Image (cartoon, helix red, strand yellow):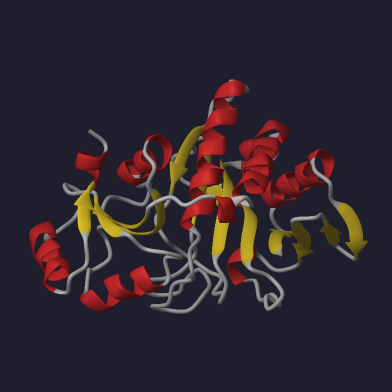
Amino acid sequence: MNLICASQKDVAGLNIARNLVEHFDFEKSGENEYSSKSAVLRIIEKNSIFADIPESDFDFIIFASRHSSAEGIHTFSIHTPGNFLDAQFGGKPGVICHSNPAAQKLALCEMKRLKEEMSLPYDVTMEATHHGPYTEKPTMFAEIGSGEEQWKDEKAGEVVACAIMKSLDYKNHAFPKAVGIGGGHYCQKHTDLMLFRDTAVGHVITKHVPLTLDRLLEARERNGGFDYFVFDWKGTPERGKVEKMLEEVGLPCKKAKDLLK
């Protein structure tokens, strides 16, 4: 069973939750809880990045959430939570969650399809791994950004709700699975791989995170499946050194630019 969470403190999350109930087969099953054949939808009190939820009964967790940015760009986005460095925004320092690359790919592609079908002025992007909460189950954030007008946009809520439900079909897809390396927070090369190639990317480690072997091995271990590392080559500091380090321990790596040719 899958768990979808939306925070009472999150306008966008509540917007997405309303659309899930309106457009899919969710029925009220308890206080602040709705259930369908494929998922439980739970409205939680805490902000999602600080959530502490019972998760033993669930295979996969999705947080329906807002995305904030100073640039104010209209976005639909997905990412895996976790902290490669400190834990200023929830979770544990230096610990990342388990990812679900296939679900992330399905959600992102559905966001792109629907925003084009509905002619909505939103970018679709994958984000690098960041913030809390810490969970022991594969976890994904599906977000509307990046200001209050977008968070309350009912059409945007519908798009993300549909993308979440599409992602729940992840067990029926066998995409090649990759850990992304390099680029900025909005990882364009890895987004393009998700949208236009068969690769499913789980964790993405930005250029701002020092690339140690232990950190790379943890990302592989918690990626929800692994076939190769994929570089944003120009966006990776010391890229030659990192490539050699991976080759020395027998871990396959590819360049995004080669896969996108």
Where does residue 137 sit, x and y in percent of width and height?
57, 72
Relative to 163, does residue 89 appear above or below in the rendering?
A: below
Where does residue 222 sit, x and y in percent of width and height?
42, 71
Q: Is residue 38 left or right of residue 102?
A: right
Q: Residue at image x 13%, y 70%? A: 245
Relative to 229, does residue 121 appear above or below in the rendering?
A: above
Q: Residue 60 sits in which quadrant?
A: bottom right
Q: How many marks?
A: 0
Q: Quadrant of the C terminus?
A: top left
Relative to 184, does residue 50 appear above or below in the rendering?
A: below
Where does residue 80 sit, x and y in percent of width and height?
48, 60
Q: Quadrant of the N terminus?
A: bottom right
Where does residue 209 sit, x and y in percent of width and height?
27, 65
> Quick one: 195 or 148, which is closer to the camera?
195
> Quick one: 27 or 121, which is closer to the camera?
27
Q: Residue at image x 54%, y 74%? A: 134
Q: Residue at image x 44%, y 40%? A: 71
Q: Is residue 164 left or right of residue 249?
A: right
Q: Is residue 217 left or right of residue 96?
A: left
